[in-house]
Amino acid sequence: MRTGALPKTCTMREDGMLDINITSIIQVVNFFIAVIVLNCLLIRPVRDIIRQRKAKMDDILASAEAFAGAASEQLAEYQNSLNRTRQEAALERAGARADALSEQQALVTEAGKRAQEQIAQTKASLLAEMQKARTSLAKQVKPLAAKAVSKMLG
């Protein structure tokens, strides 16, 4: 069945079946060796790099979520402080009114002014602190977001 100087990998027999010789087996073995080598040299390292990038992204996202959680907690704390201050101011005003009714009208006016000033000062200081915290957290979130985006884009 061999007619040329180079061996054929498989030939067609007269009954329609393929005749497989040693060259076909060597090619199959070479194919599997090439797959194993490519797996070791290319596929596995690429998978490892993908896993590392995913781990870094998970860490960055966890950090961003932690910062967002901290910002939410601080905002809630500021809101609670503001509510407590308002309640305290309301109690002061009620006490001042009761005293003013028993003493004189001038004391009522003065106590109301002091309560309003204290509320305004507390509100202004809390708003300033909230703005300062938001600015600080915004400065921290932007670099993390940029870092996350740069990591995702490679």
Image (cartoon, rainbow, N blue to C red):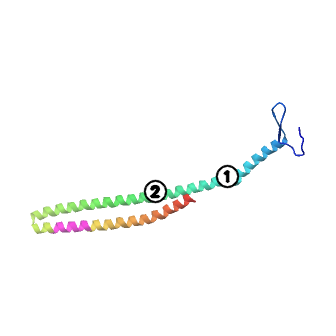
Badge 1 crowding class, 10 Å Cα cut-off, few under 14, some 14 to 19, many 20 or more, is few
| Secondary structure of the residue carrying numbered label 2 | helix
Q: Which residue is identified by label 2?
A: 65
CA gap, disc 2 to disc 1? 33 Å
Residue 96: image x %, image y %?
16, 64
112 with respect to 50 (left or right) = left
Q: Residue at x 36, y 60 (%)?
A: 75
Q: Which residue is identified by label 1?
A: 43
Q: Main secondary structure of the magenta part?
A: helix
Magenta-highlighted residues: 110-120
Give the quadrant of the C terminus: bottom right
User: Along the line of sight, which residue is nearer the eye, 10 or 132?
Assistant: 10
**Mark 2 / mark 1, whichever is N-terminal:** 1
Q: Nearer the viewer, mark 2 or mark 1?
A: 1
**Number of residue marks:** 2
| Secondary structure of the residue carrying numbered label 1 | helix
Q: Confirm whether residue 104 shows in the render.
A: no
User: Along the line of sight, which residue is nearer the eye, 4 or 38?
Assistant: 4
Q: Quadrant of residue 90?
A: bottom left
Badge 2 crowding class, 10 Å Cα cut-off, few under 14, some 14 to 19, many 20 or more, is few
User: Along the line of sight, which residue is nearer the eye, 3 or 104?
Assistant: 3
Q: Residue at x 40, y 60 (%)?
A: 71
Q: Confirm whether residue 120 shows in the render.
A: yes
Q: Quadrant of residue 85?
A: bottom left
